[in-house]
Structures are given as C-alpha cells and as structure tokens.
Amino acid sequence: MANPPHGGVLKDLLARDAPRHDELEKESETLPAIVLTERQLCDLELILNGGFSPLEGFMSEEDYNGVVENLRLKNGALFSMPICLDISPKFVEALKLKAGGRVTLRDFRDDRNLAILTIADIYKPDKKKEAQEVFGGDPEHPAIKFLMNQTHELYIGGKIEAVNRLNHYDYVALRYTPAELRTHFDKLGWAKVVAFQTRNPMHRAHRELTVRAARDRQANVLIHPVVGLTKPGDIDHFTRVRVYEALMPRYPNGMAILGLLGLAMRMGGPREAIWHAIIRKNHGATHFIVGRDHAGPGKNSKGVDFYGPYEAQEAIEKYRSELGIEVVEFQQMTYLPDADEYQPKNTVPEGVKTLDISGTELRRRLKVGAPIPEWFSYPEVVKVLRESNPPRYKQGFTIFLTGLWNSGKDAIARALQVTLNQQGGRSVSLLLGETVRSELSAELGFTREDRDKNIARIAFVAGELTKAGAAVIAAPIAPFAAAREEARHTVEKYGSFFLIHVATSLEYAEKTDKRGIYKKAKEGAIKNFTGVDDPYEKPTDADLVVDLEKQTVRSIVHEIILMLESQGFLEAAT
Ligand SMILES: Nc1ncnc2c1ncn2[C@@H]1O[C@H](COP(=O)(O)OS(=O)(=O)O)[C@@H](OP(=O)(O)O)[C@H]1O
C-alpha cells in the first residue's frame, strides 16, 4: 500500500465531484469568473487532484495566518506554504464578490471552467509578515519580489468544487495525479518509494544518489521533477523531460519510474522542503530526498545565500514525527576518478582525488561545445542538452545594418546574404527596409512613432527567426537609438544581435543617389526624410562601423564575416 496522504484522506476533488459534473458545469457558466494566472493554475491543479491534501480550496484568513505564523492550518495540521488566490479590490468590486457567493475559476489558456469556489472570506494579507515569516524577508528573494510586485492586494479564500481537470498537451502520459501514482505503485507492488525532487537536468551523480537512497531503504524510486514554474532562468522543462527520459533506462529495470509534477515552486528553502515532502506523501511516496540548499534560490546580489545549506534539512527534522514521510538527507556526491565511482562528499578520505563539474561550468561547456566527460553524464543525456544548447556555429543570429538612405546598407545586406548562403549551414533571411515596408508595414508612415513600430516589427520577426537558427540580415534606416536598443533587446532573448552602423556620410549618399530621392526631399516633395528634415541618431553602441565612401562592399562583407567567425558563428568546432 502507498503511504497514507497528509491528513489521512486524499482530497481528490475531481473524483469526489465527478458524479455532479454536469450540474456543476452548467452552474459554472452562470457565475462570475476569475481567469487564473499560470501560477494560480498550477496551485489549482494540485488542489483539485489532492496533491495539496488536506487543502480543499484556497486558504481562508484563519488558515493563512496559521500557516504564516506557525506552519499550521486552523485544524492544527502541518502545512508550510500559503496557498492563496490573490485578487484586486477593483475586481472584487466589479464582480460584486462577497462571502457566501460562488465564483468560477477559469483557465486563461482555453477559457475552460475548471472549478467553482464558494467564497469563505476576502481579506487583506499582511504581505510584509508573509515575506518575513515564510521566505525570510530578503527583498531580493524571487517569491518576495513576486509577492510585492505581482500579487494583488486581497486574497479570496474558500472551498472548491471540481468542474474539469486542466488540459495539458505536453508529456501528458507522464503527468500522474496522486491517485494515479498510488494505483501505479500498488500495481507494481511497491511498498517503499523514495521520491526525488528536481528542477534541473539529471546526471550520473543524481542517478548514483537515488540508487544509493533506494539501496539503503530497500525501496523503489520515483523521479518526480517539477514542470510547473521553477526559478526564472532554469533550463526549460521540455529539455529537462527529454533528459529524464534519456536517463531512465540507466536505472536497473523495474527500479524507478518518472512522473512529472506541475508545481509552481516558490524557492522557499526550509518551508518549501516541508511542503515538497507533504506533496510527495500525498503522491504515495514513503521517503523523500532533501538535498543541500533544497529549493533555495541561491545567492542575492551581494553574494549572500538566502538560506543556510542545511536549513531545509533542519526544518524537516523539527517536524519529522508528524510529517509521515521519511526524509532521506541528500549527501552531495562527488566523483573519485581512481575508483571510477561516486561517493558522498563527506565520506571521502582526505587526500583522495575527486572531480566535480559545477552548473556554471556545465553551461559554459554546452555554450562553446566543449567536451563533457562520461564520468559526469551519460552520452544520451549530453546529446539532449546539446540539441537544446547548440554551439554557436549552429545558433541563429541577427545582423542589423543601420544608416542613411543610400548609405550602401542594402548592397551590403544583399552581398552578405549570398556570402552566407555560399557558406551554408543556416537559412538566411533578408529583411530589407523596402521589403518590410511593403510586406509588414504597408500602412505605416515616417513619423517617429511609425518608424519605431516598423523597427519593433522587424525585431519581432528577427527574434523569431534567430530563435529558429536562421541568419537574419535586417537593413532599415532605423534612425532612432531607443528603437535600435529595443530591437537588440528583443532579439537577444533568443540569440546574438550585431548592430552595424553603415556610417557613409550624407554628402556621399546624396552624391551617389541615382534615383533623385534626396533632391525630391530637399525640394519638399518627400517630407520627414532622414538626413534632410528628419534626424539620424548616430549609434554609440555599434558592434562594427563601416563606411562605403572609404571601403568597398566586398571588404565590408569580409569584415562582417571575420567578426562572425571570431565569435564562433561560422566555424564548426572540431
Ligand atoms: N520620409 C522618409 N524618410 C525616410 N525614408 C522614406 C521616407 N519616405 C519614404 N521613404 C522610403 O522608405 C524606405 C526607408 O524605410 P525604412 O523602413 O528603412 O525606414 S525606418 O527604418 O522605418 O525609419 C526607403 O525606401 P527604399 O528606397 O525602397 O528602401 C525610403 O526611400
């Protein structure tokens, strides 16, 4: 039998309310609705499926205060994390929400009604106290930043009736509800299950650690990674799940299974560790691995750790007797090259050689395509990570040429396009000013506002193409520094951006104008013409400055190619 849930009864609201589904669905259509955010959706899913048992809804004021102050619900049960539905006073007023009323909770992704909440109370939390008591009070803590900047002023508490489960479209088969996992453990005949929480890719050390935990306790293993919300900047869950799937065959057959948990983490260290243990208990695990700095957000900007390395383990220890899940303390594993094995760091005798690769070093190696040794990770895991972190020579980039009309930027752009096509390896997209103006921005004129919009559209397209691995060459006039900076910012979310100022002088651009455009502009036939009666703000942040009066198109293209090559974009690593 799987471990009994927290509080004794699995609060599987979906199963409980299934017989009343049609009636509840009908009612949900008639009620005012709150459209849930991504984080609220994650919380709701775990309330609906019993992952947060004994909760049956979002916390009312008494439960909330009890949890913040003493880690206890009103009924005395241990619970360490406030699970609250925040709402703005304006919204409460607009929908005339009040205690006793009923409100539908809706999914923002597909507008489906998921639940009905019967309002117990609407209250103003003491956010300062919550920040201090729950997360430790450092204003740089991500959960405190979220609480202060993104969480609305009021919380709305009340019990929930389930209408529909959340729809997922990724890794659906691996997302087990607590009830499903419990059934699965029973079917497999697993009496003892060690759960392993992670928000990172797993390597050989993690495999050794979990196997060791299983061996010590004569248990099986549940790899239970978080795929809801983790720390900003973490490796995306798509990559991670492919990593876990690649790793699973490395466990002895029948020893371990993989299940995904749609939790929104708070990075709350000690409080979060207790919460994680309760969630795993609800999913049927009997043992839970708690590591060094478990669910901690690392260091603040002054380099100070938000939590002590063993604070989480100490917090758990304090509640050990009532947790109902045995905590297995994580010993950091280290590699002993002479023995070709992993050992807990604290058991390695002095003088014995050990090897480690830090997360930062791993990211560096992935970025530059440097080797990752087999003692550290399995080739199939590294392959997945490399696919998601291709080396520079496989990454997309944007070359953004800015300059006056007839500065030569279009000629350079076209010559660069064919040069890169000749090189091969990437598709090359050319976004000339005139093409964009006719295909994307036909309705725009040449006011500053319209020009800014035009550049923002180019940046959006360039960003998407860069993300997809293309070489993008954009060549608008882009006379304003702020818009160029914004474009850099947009593209750099996905790849590299090079600003090239084609600094050919106005005199030269005018002298070589075979179409008589400058003449027309000077005569007033074209208004707001850049360089004539509209400004051009010279870039101060260009990655390269070129000038067609002093250089040929060929030499400029060569300069750009050399710049790309020097940064690893053109040469395949050996
Ligand atoms: N007032 C004014 N100022 C500047 N340019 C003008 C203006 N009116 C029209 N054109 C023609 O529009 C083309 C330049 O547009 P861009 O998209 O590169 O400009 S911007 O980056 O949005 O500022 C460029 O067209 P092409 O020669 O076809 O490239 C200009 O000739």
Image (cartoon, rainbow, N blue to C red):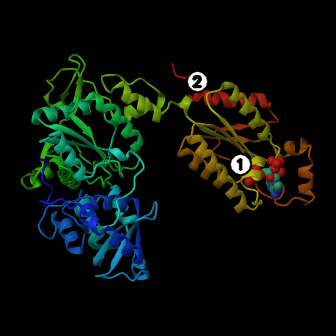
Residue 158 lies, with reference to residue 455, above or below; the image says below
Q: Are marks 2 and 1 in contact (CB under 8 Å)?
A: no
Q: In percent of the image, x 77 and y 60: which residue is there?
A: 445
Q: CA distance from mark 2 to mark 1?
A: 32 Å
Q: In percent of the image, x 85 and y 44: which residue is there?
A: 509
Judged left or right of residue 278, residue 157 is right
Question: Label for residue 571?
Answer: 2
Mark whose residue sits in front, 2 or 1 = 2
Q: Position of residue 256 (x, y in %)?
A: 22, 36
- Density class for disc 1 (Cα within 10 Å; few <14, some 14-19, many ≥20) is some
- Asked whether the viewer can see residue 545, the reply is yes
Residue 66 lies, with reference to residue 3, above or below; the image says below
Residue 359 lies, with reference to residue 271, above or below; the image says above
Q: Position of residue 317 (x, y in %)?
A: 10, 50
Front residue of 83/104: it is 104
Instruction: Give the structural element (helix, strand or loop) at label 2.
Output: loop
In the picture of the structure, the residue carrying the numbered disc 1 is 538
Instruction: Give the structural element (helix, strand or loop) at label 1.
Output: loop
Judged left or right of residue 132, residue 570 is right
Question: Label for residue 377?
Answer: none
